Amino acid sequence: MRNFALGLVLSLFAGTAMADPVEGIWKTAVDDGAYAHVNIAPCGAALCGHITRTFNSGGEFKSDSIGKKLVWDMQAKGSGAYSGGKIWQPSSGKVYKSKMSMKGNVLNVSGCVGPICKKQVWTRAK
């Protein structure tokens, strides 16, 4: 009976520990001849994305960007929308205010510095 009660309590809390749908590996759009795989995962109360692999026209290569945060402080707003975060563009070194919207295996990512905005479409790699 005790095991049953423990199982019931754990199942009630399982919903709060479920992964956010955006978590996982995403392939970025090509920027300055290269693209990356970014692992989006929780970091504190927000979501962050770290570069895990980098590619160019010759295939995979070991960039100095591997392991660095590309996205941070992203907050889920519901219905596939995320905002309040920042995004770093490795090719320029600039950091932009960012938001994302996810539908299926497509992630629309945008970042702005003042009136200058850039957009990319990322696809789920895993």
Image (cartoon, rainbow, N blue to C red):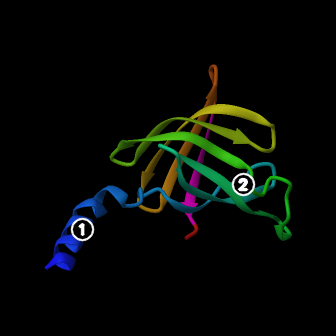
* Residue closer to the observer: 51 or 36: 51
Q: Which residue is the site of mark 1?
A: 11
Residue at x-position 47% and y-position 43%:
45
Q: Secondary structure at mark 2?
A: loop
Compared across the picture, whether 101 is left or right of 85 comes to left
Task: Out of 21 and 43, give the one closest to the viewer.
Answer: 43
Q: Check the image and name the residue furthest to the top.
A: 114
Q: Which mark is residue 30?
A: 2
Image-based side of 70 in relation to 16, left or right: right
x then y, percent, for residue 1: 13, 79
Question: Quadrant of the rendered structure where residue 114 is?
Answer: top right
| Secondary structure mostly taken by the magenta-highlighted segment of the chain | strand
Q: Position of residue 123 (x, y in %)?
A: 55, 61
Residue at left offset 55%, top offset 70%: 126
Q: Which label sits on residue 126?
A: none
Residue 60 in picture, x, y percent from top left: 80, 70
Q: Residues within 10 Å of mark 1 (few under 14, many from 20)?
A: few
